Image: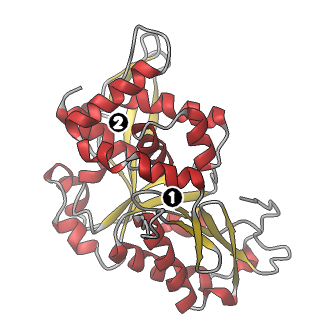
């Protein structure tokens, strides 16, 4: 794997904060069992995530066992991203294993080192900020906060026949904060980029998603003016940042051969979700795999988080919840 391929794989990985956590613990030398214990996940889930990480970075071995694969992954990061290896020192993970916790903000735990020096992770700082913002806009008037492990979620107080599910929740990770919101709320604000695929065997056109994005309210002009030139003719000309747009047409589709499983990707050449426009103007959106009724965004910046939470927090508060009913009570 060369440097551009490595960087592309790393950019894709940033959409999956849980896998990033597993990766950093893996680079720190933690075993599968230790990672499962530290993250409060089943061993089988962790094994699957680790296998996916090897695949993501093209790690293979003709020898049985996990050790060779781990060493290859570590060597790859030492070559292209050495700070990720050095930052995941045994001292840090030992503290996580020992569960040295202090309590802050309504029982939310944070790790401290044995020398009492606070080990503050970006995700921890951001989750405190998100909670404070929701408190300031009066979120507790309609919503009740619940907490479990690294999740903090909000759902309606005394919902009755209204939607009992969590409407917004946060997942704290090592390098940022995952924010998930009910799809019914976010759908109308999304920019969806599609592409057409023609299936040779059946002669049918298939509509595929290349990426989903949320252009931050108030940043529409920055997003459009900073667009990668590849997408000017799709978005900039019409000055639109919401809705469905196609990277190709049915007259010039990609082709999929079911016999060989080969798919042409001409319209996707050079397409990178994190290089669409100015990084402060939009968020990449994906379906939360654990709560599939929500869209998930991964946020690194305090400024972006503040804009996002204030805007959509107020929308959640003003929503008429009597027209939404779902009796499924989803626990963490």
- Reply above or below: 98 against 262: below
Q: CA distance from mark 2 to mark 1?
A: 30 Å
- Asked whether residue 268 appears in the rendered view, the answer is no
Q: Is residue 281 left or right of residue 289?
A: left
| Residue displayed at 45% across by 21% down | 67
Q: Position of residue 13 (x, y in %)?
A: 39, 43
Label 2: state its secondary structure: loop
Between residue 81 and residue 52, name the one nearer to us. 81
How many tags in the picture?
2
Q: Position of residue 111 (x, y in %)?
A: 52, 64
Between residue 112 and residue 297, name the one nearer to us. 112
Q: Is residue 56 left or right of residue 49?
A: left
Q: Quadrant of the N terminus?
A: top left
- List the residue tagged with mark 1: 296
Query: For the view shown, which residue lies furthest in the right direction?
Result: 160
Neighbour tally class for label 1: few under 14, some 14-19, many 20 plus, Cα within 10 Å: many
């Amino acid at each position: 794997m060369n440097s551009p391929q490595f960087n592309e794989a790393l950019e894709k990985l940033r959409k999956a904060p849980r896998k990033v956590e597993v990766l950093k613990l893996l680079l720190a030398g933690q075993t599968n069992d230790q990672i499962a214990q530290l993250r409060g996940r089943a061993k089988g889930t962790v094994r699957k995530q680790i296998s996916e990480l090897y695949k993501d970075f093209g790690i293979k071995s003709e020898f049985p066992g996990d050790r060779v694969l781990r060493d290859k992954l570590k060597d790859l990061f030492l070559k292209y991203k050495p700070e990720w290896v050095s930052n995941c020192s045994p001292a840090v993970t030992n503290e996580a294993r020992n569960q040295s916790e202090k309590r802050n903000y309504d029982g939310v735990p944070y790790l401290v080192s044995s020398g009492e020096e606070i080990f503050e992770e970006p995700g921890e700082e951001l989750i405190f900020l998100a909670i404070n913002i929701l408190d300031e806009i009066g979120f507790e008037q309609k919503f009740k906060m619940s907490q479990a492990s690294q999740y903090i979620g909000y759902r309606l107080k005394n919902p009755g026949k209204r939607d009992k599910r969590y409407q917004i929740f946060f997942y704290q990770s090592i390098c940022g904060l995952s924010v998930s919101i009910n799809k019914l709320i976010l759908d109308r604000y999304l920019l969806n980029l599609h592409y057409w695929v023609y299936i040779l065997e059946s002669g049918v056109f298939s509509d595929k998603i290349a990426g989903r994005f949320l252009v931050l309210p108030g940043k529409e002009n920055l997003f459009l003016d900073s667009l990668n030139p590849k997408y000017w003719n799709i978005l900039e000309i019409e000055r639109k940042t919401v809705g469905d747009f196609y990277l190709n047409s049915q007259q010039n589709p990609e082709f999929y051969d079911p016999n060989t499983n080969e798919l042409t990707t001409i319209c996707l050449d050079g397409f990178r979700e994190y290089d669409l426009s100015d990084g402060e103007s939009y968020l990449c959106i994906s379906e939360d795999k654990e709560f599939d009724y929500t869209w998930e965004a991964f946020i690194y910046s305090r400024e972006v988080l503040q804009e996002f939470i204030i805007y959509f927090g107020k929308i959640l508060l003003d929503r008429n919840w009597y027209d939404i009913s779902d009796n499924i009570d989803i626990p963490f």
